[in-house]
Amino acid sequence: MTMGLLDRARAAARPQVTGSVVGAMGLTLSVEGVPAAVGDLVEVNPSPQGGLLAEVVAVARERLTCMPLGELSGVHAGARVRATGMPLQVPVGEALLGRVLDGLGRPVDGGPPLDPQSLEFVDLASETPHALTRTRVAEPLTSGVRVLDTMVPLGRGQRLGIFAGSGVGKSTLLAQITRGTDADVRVIGLIGERGREVREFLEENLGEEGMARTVVVVATSDEPPLVRLKAAFVATRIAEGFRDQGRDVLLTMDSITRTAMAQREVGLSAGEPPATRGYPPSVFAMMPKLLEKAGTASVGSITGLYTVLVDGDDHNEPIADTARSILDGHVVLTRKLATAGHFPAIDVLESISRVATAVVPPAQMADAREVRRLMGALRDVKELIEIGAYQAGTDPLVDRARQLAPAIESFLQQPTGELTPAGDSWAWLNRIVRS
Ligand SMILES: Nc1ncnc2c1ncn2[C@@H]1O[C@H](COP(=O)(O)OP(=O)(O)OP(=O)(O)O)[C@@H](O)[C@H]1O
Ligand SMILES: [Mg+2]
């Protein structure tokens, strides 16, 4: 739903009703004397510079329960509260390209304020494209990373998880893909990451030229949980804005695990019971809602890449489990490869793109399958080889795999600064298979 100029004028012209804070506890504020609906924003200690925004999460008679989108400290009982008359508004449009926004869609890059003339402000809530109006994923999306473009190919409108333990190279891989992709527009959500890393990411990984086609939405780990949670939806909403113009958007979210943790904090403080491993039910309701927004629609596409933290190979971890069931493909990074200095540390045999056959021509698919077959054969006898129990000549496939292993290795490894056009990657792979 779009908030037109008229609506905004009406909201501004409404009589200003102010109420007051009657209590604050944990992450919630109780407010009385302000008429507002669930989802609306209220402003505590209103001022021209902007007071503390809070979202109404529950209403009971005259009392509102609100969750702050900022620091609660300093808010006292009796503080004035103003109804804004509307839910959070998110900017969408061309003028966002090159900008860095906070979790609520406000610029934090020191640049000029957002110009309402050249942007549209829309509700955060948007309609998820209906399954039947979505076009099928049929076009490849180049990442510039050889192992991905050939062995785990991405499709425009696909949603893919990048699963890994901490410090194995998730963020570095995302940055590499962001630089190498041929998507029209990139939207980057950095959710719950360390502040230091964000700076590094922007300066070292993207650079000036990379920023020109990019919008970044950041909510670092020190921000209130509701802001971190909103940031994921704001980034997605901005990507939807571009998709609705018919653009192919790459949306990256680092990380979906931290987004789920933010929802956990919000849910628990709103009084939800912890259910699965300390996560309240709202977490498992939020994830499909967020992830289903990416994908194809009747026009344009959002290719979603989401990083998922898996701690110590815990496959029953509920967030990873839920993500895996929603997404249409996953890339697994392993510590074993990373510590061996093999980057990107992608475990090819454990990674799968469910759209591969739809976006890759059969001849190329056959080459990729052949490399998988060779890698699989080698993995099966790896231990035998290591203890010297494998005799050359026992299995022709294994022998061939051993012979080609160095060539495959150097194909799979790729320095972060290096980007390979997809056509070159396929030609390289074909040379290996034919040799
Ligand atoms: N492609 C690469 N080439 C060389 N080194 C890499 C590569 N990717 C990752 N590394 C090394 O691994 C470290 C951690 O990488 P990165 O921050 O991307 O991991 P992460 O999985 O995002 O970590 P976290 O879980 O902390 O977010 C880097 O600082 C770098 O030393
Ligand atoms: Mg990271």
Image (cartoon, grey):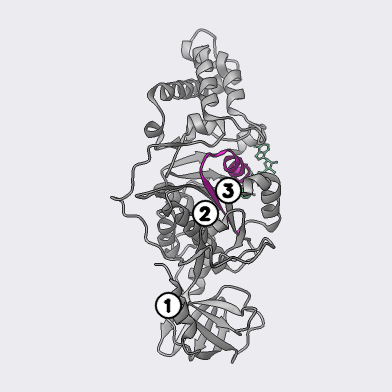
At a point 52% along the width and 54% down the height, the residue shown is 256
| Foreground: disc 1 or disc 2 | 1
Residue 425 visible somewhere in the drawing: yes
**Three-letter amino acid code at the position of disc 1:** Val
Magenta-colored span: 169-192
Whole-percent x and y of residue 352? 45, 36
Looking at marks 1 and 3 on the same chain, the residue that comes earlier in the sequence is marked by 1
> Where residue 213 is drawn, which disc sits there?
3
44 in relation to 173, above or below? below
Q: Is residue 224 magenta?
A: no
Looking at marks 2 and 3 on the same chain, the residue that comes earlier in the sequence is marked by 3
- Report, in whole angstroms, how far the alpha carbon at label 1 lies from the one at label 3: 35 Å
Which residue was labeled with disc 1?
38
Whole-percent x and y of residue 222? 65, 65
**Cβ of disc 3 within 8 Å of ligand 1?**
no
- Report, in whole angstroms, how far the alpha carbon at label 2 lies from the one at label 3: 23 Å
> Where residue 256 is drawn, which disc sits there?
2
| Foreground: disc 2 or disc 3 | 3
**Three-letter amino acid code at the position of disc 3:** Arg
Instruction: Count numbered badges in the picture.
Output: 3
The residue lying toward the viewer, choosing from 415 and 7, is 7
In the rendered structure, are the residues bearing label 2 and label 3 in contact, judged by CB atoms less than 8 Å apart? Answer: no
Whole-percent x and y of residue 242? 47, 53
| Foreground: disc 1 or disc 3 | 3
Q: Which quadrant would residue 221 be assigned to in this image?
A: bottom right
- Crowd tier of the residue under label 1, counting other residues whose Cα lies within 10 Å: few below 14, some 14–19, many 20 or above: some
**Three-letter amino acid code at the position of disc 2:** Ile
In the rendered structure, are the residues bearing label 1 and label 3 in contact, judged by CB atoms less than 8 Å apart? Answer: no
